[in-house]
Image (cartoon, rainbow, N blue to C red):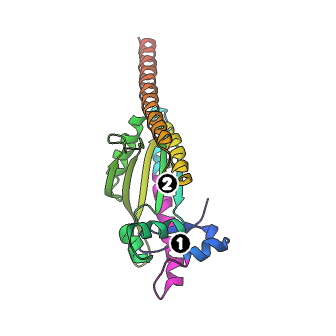
Amino acid sequence: MNKYLHFYEFLCYTDDRIKTDRSSKRKAMQLKGKDNGIDSWKEVTLIYNAALRQVETKMEILNEEFQHVHQYNPIEHIKARIKTPESIVKKLKRYGYESTIDNMVKHVNDIAGIRIICSFTSDIYMIAETIKQQRDIKVVAVKDYITYPKASGYKSYHMIVTVPVYLSDRIVDTKVEIQIRTVAMDFWASLEHKIHYKFEGDAPRHIKEELIECSKMVADLDARMLSLNNEIVTLAQAQEESKCR
């Protein structure tokens, strides 16, 4: 399992490539910490490792339970990612803020991220509801880009949550961003992300239009696959009932 090096105070972290990548180390220095920065880095490593493990474990348990009860896995796979210091600094500059730990906590909500990839759109809302019902998870914000897609055609279900990390002397509520989407949505978003950075957010008009058309195809594919799966489930249930007669 990947280890994480987290910044501090709720939601800032980067991966352990910082330990070996000199370039990343130099960029990390752009983030101004407090006087006890060295101690804080060590503490945050512990805190955010714990937060990510909690969310991942909860989702794995949910998946295992569905397999046991329903013989079905709603989650295809889970991806955990950490925003790099370079990305954090760029985002703060874009927002017009100085690159400090306090500003990261207040103004950057997607530093810690977990992406849950599902087979069908119905799984997305079921998983989201399950997360909301967890007593030790507090939902801070929700953005439903499936019901209300972005102009680019982007679709995904986003949640900002806090997870309590229990230390020996206190409890630290740690923020994690959760993205839930289908395999098809994830494929589209991956390409859109590459294009966005390739053209620095200003892709040619025909490429943007083609992406929008592809997003419509993805939505149609998701709808047809869900309909097909529902039909398969209905037929299977009918066969089981006929056997019991």
Q: Main secondary structure of the magenta part?
A: helix
Q: Earlier in the sequence, mark 1 or mark 2?
A: 1
The percent coordinates of residue 90 (x first, y second) are 48, 67
- Residue 240 appears left or right of 143: right
Asked which secondary structure carries label 2, the reply is: helix
Q: Is residue 183 magenta?
A: no
Q: How many marks?
A: 2
Q: Measured along the vertical axis of the image, is residue 235 above or below residue 55?
A: above
Q: Residue furthest bottom?
A: 35
Asked which secondary structure carries label 1, the reply is: helix
Q: Is residue 39 magenta?
A: yes
Q: Measured along the vertical axis of the image, is residue 9 above or below residue 234?
A: below
> Which residue carries the number 2 mark?
56
Task: Give the camera-side residue of 79 and 101.
Answer: 101
Q: Quadrant of residue 70?
A: top left
Q: Measured along the vertical axis of the image, is residue 174 above or below residue 26?
A: above
As measured in the structure, the alpha-carbon distance from the residue carrying label 1 to the one carrying label 2 is: 17 Å
Do labels 1 and 2 touch, CB within 8 Å? no
Q: Quadrant of residue 4?
A: bottom right
At x 60%, y 77%, the residue is: 26
The region drawn magenta spans: 29-58
Task: Give the camera-side residue of 221 and 72.
Answer: 221
Q: Disc number at residue 45?
A: 1
Task: Give the camera-side residue of 98 and 113.
Answer: 98
The percent coordinates of residue 95 (x first, y second) are 38, 67
At x 55%, y 79%, the residue is: 29
The percent coordinates of residue 68 (x first, y second) are 49, 37
Q: Name the image quarter holding the C terminus.
A: top left
Q: Measured along the vertical axis of the image, is residue 104 above or below residue 215?
A: below
Give amino acid for label 2: Glu
Give amino acid for label 1: Thr
